[in-house]
Image (tube, rainbow, N blue to C red):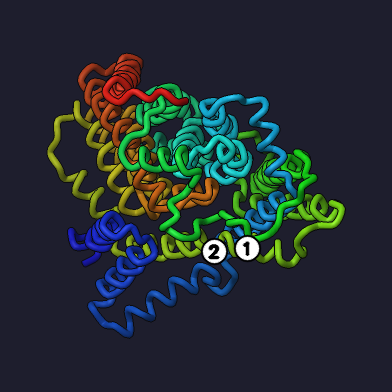
Amino acid sequence: MEGTIFSLIPAVLMLVLVLLTRKVILSLGIGIIVGAFMLTQMDIGAGLSLIWSIFAGIFYSDGSLNTGSIYLLSFLFLLGVTTAFMTASGGSRAFGKWAVERIGSRRGAKLVPSLLGIVIFIDDYFNALAVGQVARPVTDRYKVSRAKLAYYIDSTSAPITVISPISSWGAYIIGTIGSILAANEITDFQAFEAFVLMIPANLYVFAALLLVFLTIYFRLDIGPMKKHEQRALTTGELTNPEKGDVPGDLNDEFKKHDNGKISHLVLPIVSLIVGTVAMMVITGIQNSEGSPDILSVFANTNVNISLFIGGLAAVIVALFSYIGQPQPKSGIAHVFLEGMKAMLPAIYILIFAWIIGDIIGQLQTGEYLAQQFKQADINIAYLPFIIFILSGFMALSTGTSWGTFGIMLPIAGEIAAVTDPALILPALSAVLAGSVFGDHCSPISDTTILSSTGAGSNHIDHVLTQLPYAVIAAVAASIGYIILGLTGQVWIPLLITLGIVFGIALIIHKLNPQTSA
């Protein structure tokens, strides 16, 4: 069944179940079981053994510890502990009071995560989690639903990192582009120059970013998001009370200190940022050959260990801030354990997503979709559009932008080089754009999971509330890619794409005006 149309079954089944049941663990679990049985010809014992081996491989593989996943999971625990100490010390409350006095409006509160998401462009994981920690006290004060906060985080993290050359994504993409250009004997530009030239052709990214700010200005609460925002405004419930615990939400498990200071929140966050960025630079230099430049540093950095060290630094600073308070109201061990427990929902989802991602990879779902594309007889003018759609569906099914990059970038580059070399950069841009779009829609995307975690939102609530906005941006980008393929222009399709997004937002606003910011 590998590499055939049947390889789509687990991914499609999982997506349908998520939409029907809204139970992500159940849906992922069924997808995992079905996929494992398909790989083992319906042998129950062998299927269960395969699932166990994949699960064990998350922590131990090839005779050694799998440090990458262990560091990332450990970082999530550390982030939960940091949040717990910042909350218990009263730092989050103090920052919220300070922000309310200076920001002055709900619209201003929404700008905080949106602008921070653009400023913190080094890595999508880091972006998603750090922005949530800073912005949540502000948005909570102004009764912005956690689903809306998760949307702002998710729709600025991947879009900004995928067009930033000084980021973990940018460095990886530039390296991949270099090999594609060499393989197809294209010497008109170097890899870095090609990446920069590709930026304006990444139409979905700019459409998604524009839509973020239009939702703030026009207060565009569409689809399920409208229910979440109305509940937050009228009842103060920032999450759906029927959904139970959400990742990163402490649910008043301990008493907060009354004399907290802003520094009790700011210093741990600064420690997190400084520690993570410093370790990214250090590990990048250590893993680079010769005299490293800034691109090689970010291309070779170890993001997961950097996050772990940054998280450890944040925990230490937050801990000392808490124990320095006069008469702490909760025991250190209690706060520590509650912080770890708050991250368990996110960790469960992430582990299940890794398992089904491995199974989908073994079923060669991505390779099947790519092969179907290569065999299709299509008009070359529609190449960017087709690549955008296929990359989006591949990222949606597999839950990975990077995996889609690895499969689709070489294929898109080869097809464009053979048929019309002028379309090679737009074709590669369409891969990046489609991958981010699919990532935004996928419940098994690690970036989407971490955005839910950073915001303290129920994961499926985040996926379903973000979906209409992602589709709007994708529709506009699709039209833009058709125009790009027909005209060979880049800036005109970009302006048309942005114009379509603005027009749709204006129409929605006119049909459903909101008076409250």
Q: Which residue is mark 1?
A: 340
Give residue 116's quadrant in the image: top right
- Badge 2 is on which residue? 344
Give the label on residue 301, or none.
none
Mark yes or no: residue 378 visible: yes
Name the one closer to the observer, 289 or 210: 210
- Residue type at mark 1 is Met
In the displayed structure, 28 sits above or below 297; it is: below
- Can you tell which quarter of the image residue 135 is in? top right
In this orientation, which residue lies closer to the viewer: 255 or 198? 255
SS class, disc 2: helix
Q: Circle 1 sits in a helix, a strand or a loop, which is it?
A: helix
| Residue 75 left/right relative to 391 | right
Contact flag, marks 1 and 2 (Cβ < 8 Å): yes
- Residue drawn at x 37%, y 47% as measured from the top left: 463
User: Residue type at mark 2?
Assistant: Leu
The foreground one among 502 and 64 is: 502
Measuring from the top left, give residue 427's x and y in whole percent.
31, 32
